[in-house]
Amino acid sequence: MRLILLAAPGAGKGTQAEMLSEHYNIPSISTGAILRKNIKEGTELGKIAAEYINEGRLIPDELMLKVMDERFKQDDCKNGFILDGFPRTIAQAEALSASPIEIDKVLSLEVDDETIIERLGGRLECKSCGSTYHTEHKPPKTPGICDKCGGELGTRADDKPETVRERLHTYHTQTEPLIEYYKNKGLLRVAKGQSEIDATSRVVLEALEA
Ligand code: ADP
Ligand code: ZN
């Protein structure tokens, strides 16, 4: 199973990617997590990525394609994967489609902008392992502490209101056209985001397995 998840920032894409990764026993590849790890480690890629991410813009296609090329070569990709955050532009989708990788399904998780702005407001991220939480919708067992690794939780730099607006704009102009692109290829499945995580997971699985 090689799956692409499409959704606006804050729609719950990462949470559903984690659920699907367990369900199908294949890795979830989060481009945002890869980039943030590079920023934290101060790599060359991280230095460039930080400038774009902090402004709510996408990092250049060429650079992103190089990152993914490397990632697809790793062993754990052999039996399939879930792509959380790639492709994000038509140019990235065309490069993927020109590669030997065959995508089976593309799931679009639909959530309206108001819900997104509300959700990103309460989002928390583990500074050590990158797991995400939400003060209301997905609270950690102990406030401020990651359930998975005990790391400290904090707010992502790009979750501040000005950047959130810019990220939504970027999504609508650059990523949303992919919905039509994959619809035309006959790969698109659509799921409506629900207010509860479990309900969303059910809708997502139904859409994929129908
Ligand atoms: P979200 O989906 O909540 O915006 P992500 O963690 O998926 O967050 O991505 C964070 C940021 O990383 C994006 O706003 C963008 O700047 C950068 N990024 C992630 N994936 C890509 C990609 N495929 N192409 C270009 N930039 C990307
Ligand atoms: Zn953690």
Image (spheres, rainbow, N blue to C red):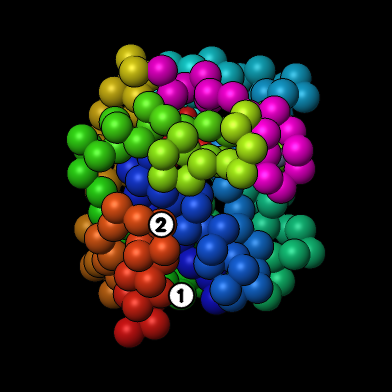
Where residue 4 sits, quadrant-wise, is: bottom left
Question: Label 2 is placed on what type of residue?
Answer: Ile
The outermost residue toward the front is: 142
Image quarter of residue 27: bottom right
Can residue 8 be seen from the camera position used here? Answer: yes
Horizontal and vertical percent position of residue 106:
38, 65
Q: Which residue is mark 1?
A: 104
Give the extent of the magenta segment.
145-160
Q: Is residue 79 left or right of residue 85?
A: right
Residue 35 position within the rendered picture, expressed as x and y whole percent measured from the top left: 62, 33
Circle 2 — which element? helix
In the depicted view, which residue is nearer to us: 202 or 20?
202
Q: Which residue is mark 2?
A: 197
Q: Measuring 25% from the left and 60% from the top, which residue is drawn there?
A: 192
At 58% from the left and 47% from the top, the residue drawn is: 30
| Residue found 35% across the figure and 46% down from its top | 11
